[in-house]
Image: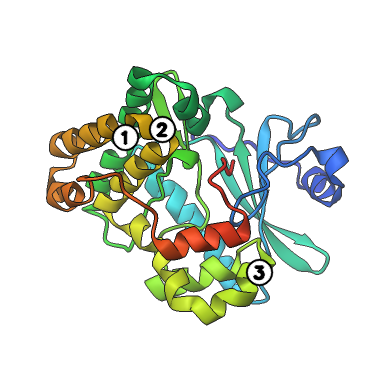
Amino acid sequence: MTDTETPLDLAALETLIRSDSASRGEPISKLGYFCAPFRPANGPFSDKVIKVYRGLADPAALDRLHQCHDDYVQALKGAAVPMPDTQFLLLSMEGTRIPVIVQQALPASSMMRPQMQNGDLPETLKLMESAGQVIARFWHWAEQAPMRIGFHPSIRNFAVLDGEAIFFDTFPPLIHYSRDEMGKMLLQFSEKRLMRWVGPFLQTKVTGIQDEWYSPAETLVGMVGSACRLRPEHAAAYLDWGRDFVGREMKPWAEEALAGLDRPPKLPGYWTGFRKVLGLQGEPNV
């Protein structure tokens, strides 16, 4: 997690992206909402995760996306959120510019979700405490931020390595965009053609997906809810942890958070429906 960006061989990266899956390696996850990230099996990018997104016809919108992503990474660093080295590029390919994120790969064994699935109760509570500290740190920093900024600290967007929670999901960049603009982005960049086709008819509901990401209380409640769904046998302990944590570390938002922690939190019905239609079952998206 250094701040030094290593120059990338863009020609080699373009060749890698154009190559078939046999050459570049199978996707790490095929269930991502915006793309299916992959880690090459060999070559100069074998220690990187590559995330390739849909292009846009509007050059100004792409330039803005690039700037917002750079600003978001800097904001996360300013909030002392641990992150792998992350670079955003606009590659000129086939007559258009394609957004690409190149990120330092993390060990598969460090992903928080499988650790939550396989650990015993004390181990999983330590994982949640590590992630919770990052959530609290971000929102206390964001209280002083002049811009609209959000955070999506779901279990599947964290790794935990040597006791430290590491956040790695920087797309879409949750900074500067208005609520309506972000709602449209959720459709524009969706990898799922079905979502882009039916989404405009449900724009109000799609736009609402983001609201949790801009609420300090709901980001914490959302993580607790995910833990309860992953390990329902430990739900009571996770709720107890959440109530204790907001009292210790997130006092400005404790009242709102406590209201969502009186029972295992559930996903909104419309988002559950979208996930089932799109085949998104919460697998890691790194």
Q: Is residue 283 left or right of residue 124?
A: right
Position of residue 62 measured from the top left corner of the image (x, y, whole percent):
60, 68
Q: Disc number at residue 194?
A: 3
Callout in the foreground (3, 2): 2
Residue identified by numbered label 1: 235
Quadrant into which the C terminus falls: top right
Q: Is residue 154 left or right of residue 138?
A: right
Instruction: Please state which amino acid type lies under the numbered disc 3.
Output: Leu
Labels 3 and 1: the sequence-earlier one: 3
* Mark seen at residue 231: 2
User: In front: 48, or 252?
Assistant: 252
Q: In the image, is 121 to the left or to the right of 101?
A: left
Alpha carbons under labels 3 and 1: distance apart: 34 Å
Q: In the rendered structure, are the residues bearing label 2 and label 1 in contact, judged by CB atoms less than 8 Å apart? A: yes
Pointer 3 and pointer 2: residues touching (CB < 8 Å)?
A: no
Front in this rendered view, residue 139 or 196: 196
Mark 3 in CB contact with mark 1 (< 8 angstroms): no
